[in-house]
Image: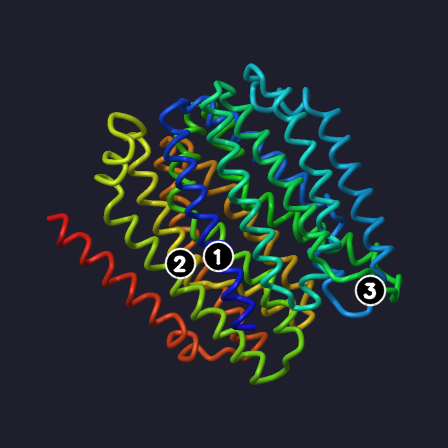
Amino acid sequence: MREGVAWLLAARALTVLAQLGALLVVAYHIGPSDLGLAGMVAVVVGVVGVAADFGVETLAARPGVDDTRATWISVRAGLGCAITLGLLAPAVSRVFRSPEGLTFLLGTGAAGLIFTGFAAPARARLRRALQFRRLALADALRALVAGGGAVGLVLGGYGAFGLVAADVVAGAVAAVLAWLLAPALKGGSRDGLAADGLRVVGTRLFDACFAQADRFLVGGRLGPADLGLYGFAWRHAMLPLQHFLPVADQAALPALARLQGEALVRGYLTLTRILAVAIVPFAALLWAIAPWLIEALYPGRWQEAVPAVRALCVAAAAAGLNSDPGILWLSLGLTRLRLWWSAANLLVVVFVVWAGTRHGITGVAYALAGRSLLATVAGQVASRRVAGVPHLAYVRAVAPGAAAGALVAGASLLLGA
């Protein structure tokens, strides 16, 4: 598991660098409104996309699944989601108060769902074979194509369309590469694949709505310009969380599912330690240096986002300490607990973000920081009860990341002073 996590973390690190580099250029050539329009597309595609593979990337990573059946399910799901979003684009645009050009952008983003469905069966076979090096290669290529494409199209004057189109092209390239690298199709059981897929999609839907609720409410209540500022802050503060935490879903689930008892607990604590070290120091550093960093990188621009950046860094650090308790519960077969956890998270985040919008994007960011801290405590308490993860062992696992974060933040503040 450690080798797989290492490869995927390396790919995610490259993705972070590619996105930061692209954003550094893009933010000089577009304003908050264009970034907000692209953010609206990302919100909608992110929610609809949970059904674009019908759970195949998760389910087909298990041994004994019929790959041909899984492929047909995933491809048809991706095509169906793309057509549905394309047809509903005008109605969805009205939810965001119909900003100019959003309907067309939603139709463009919908095309990417086709490639999500096409890529999922190949990615599942790579995960099942524990070929994380090849999976990391596909992820890294996607990041480079998306970042380079966004820069090229924005410099060419395509604005928000350039951001959306670059992501669609990157998805297509990564999907083709995943199929080229994946093991051959194998036969197996077809039983329960569709029913299990529905449950996976249901859980993902809660998770996706939870992940996108802040941007959906900011866009719907405050408009594209505020969403652009919030999205700018979110892209900086949440970069490590956005890219490192999904490693748990890709590498840890197939590995942890093979373990039982104390070995499972040790594996989960190892994952917790790795993610805390990868996420918390980065969040602490950005929290400390955000004011002068944004002024240095974007002089005279985007300064309104600084308070939101710092608040979201707290949320990211807390989530890094929380690891992903759901991955532990899924390894134990506790799918119902995972589903209820996702539903509860969604309800809480909708409430706190709705309340936060009364105080602008900074209010939203502080509301999410508080929720994230409470979720860290609640997740550990639940893991202790259902899996026997000792509180002291958990504290020891997160201690290196927390200590490194405190040192980084303190040193940065002292040097800045």
| Residue 143, position as x, y percentages in the image | 52, 44
Check disc 2 and give the amino acid type. Ile
Check disc 3 and give the amino acid type. Val
Residue carrying label 3: 65
Residue carrying label 1: 244
Q: Residues within 10 Å of mark 3 (few under 14, many from 20)?
A: many
Residue 212 sits in quarter: top right
**In this view of the protein, which residue sits in the foreground, 249 or 379?**
249
Compared with residue 313, is residue 300 higher up or lower down, i.e. above or below? above
Decide which of tag 1 and tag 3 comes sooner along the chain: 3
- Seen as rendered, the residue at the extreme top is 100
Decide which of tag 2 and tag 1 comes sooner along the chain: 1
| Residue 236, position as x, y percentages in the image | 38, 42
Q: Residue at x 49, y 38 (%)?
A: 147
Query: Quick check: marks 2 and 1 in contact, CB under 8 Å?
Result: yes
Q: Residue at x 32, y 66 (%)?
A: 402
